[in-house]
Amino acid sequence: MKKLAVILMLISLQPVCAQHREDSAGTVKPTRQTAVHDPVMIKQGDTYYLFCTGWGISSFSSKDMKNWRKEKRVFATPPQWAIDAIPSFKGHIWAPDISFHNGQYYLYYSVSAFGKNTSCIGLAVNKTLDPASPDFQWIDKGKVIQSVPGKDMWNAIDPNQIDDENGDHWLVFGSFWNGMKLVKLNDSLTAVAQPEEWHTVAARPRDFSIPDTAAGDAAIEAPFILKKDNYYYLFVSWDYCCRGEKSNYKVVVGRSEKLTGPYLDKTGLSMTQNGGSLVAEGDNKEWFGAGHNAAYQFEGKYYLIYHGYDAKDKGKPKLIIDELQWDSNGWPFIKKVKTNN
């Protein structure tokens, strides 16, 4: 009976986004009605492009960051290398990251077995994000990093690519386990640089005899680094996503003058020792929980791009776009803007 109860619990915790029917390509909805998980954004020309968790990687476009047009998924069929690497993988791809280098757009993405560190981070590239362009074609570059149960105490999901002040390329990633990892990439951004250089930039103490699905106060994932002025700001998400009305996701931040850390919160506590200053959380009125953010500067303004579990729509995951402002000590806080209405 106990084993059956555990199985039923795990089934109930499957990502909420996988339970909802996706809109068809061409559908346009305002921000508050746009169903997403783990959104990231980039601007090409006069158009914003959004990528997020979904079958084959969901994508959207917008001219104003207020109304979003559903685009075709990045992968029409699951990458074969991912099927081979992750036996339970069926094509539902998690937590992408988008950036621009060397005349191409780099889209990192996660494939994983839910609640385990049987995971990989892959990479696809494209010369343009405009589906109408003759150059539009996603080319998969395959696996970049893999975590193996029984060998690695980290989880290869939730990637975010960042360059340091010297122009070196890095990837920060992780979910639960022993923390958020930062690793240097090679010049082509397709593999870990040699010799390898790794850093732990955030972690929460946990008992590894307890599974991720019940790790409680040790829940941490979704790292994202933003460079502003003299600091690198590391955002991570604490607590639980994917539980609809029971979600208690939140975003915290720390900062460092060096990309490799240490990242300290407002009190001076290191993020490797459970440090983190609150930026966003649910209020049980608008959102039950809110997290898995990206942070960008567009047109001179900073934005936090993330998802929340809609308290006005049975806890369904929706897109949130908030303006970030900065206090007199250089710490980010949210200024609500009309894009959420």
Image: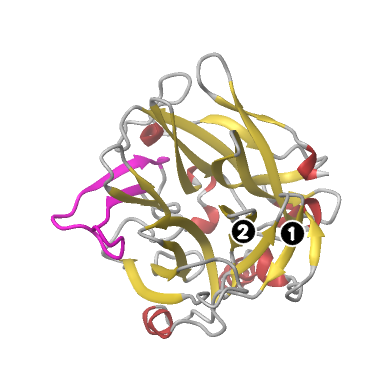
Q: Is 186 contained in the magenta span? A: yes
User: In the rendered picture of this protein, how many numbered marks are placed on residues?
Assistant: 2
Q: Residue at x 38, y 25 (%)?
A: 230
x and y percentages locating residue 186 in the rendered image: 23, 58
* Residue 317 horizontal side relative to residue 204, left or right: right
Q: Is residue 14 visible?
A: no
Q: Is residue 79 above or below residue 316?
A: below
Q: Residue at x 48, y 75 (%)?
A: 138
x and y percentages locating residue 168 in the rendered image: 26, 47
Q: How is the image coloured?
A: secondary structure
Q: Quadrant for residue 117, please give it.
A: bottom left
User: Magenta segment, which residues?
Assistant: 180-205
- Density class for disc 2 (Cα within 10 Å; few <14, some 14-19, many ≥20) is many
Query: Which one is in front, 157 or 113?
Result: 157
State the mark number for residue 50: 2
Q: Residue at x 50, y 42 (%)?
A: 236
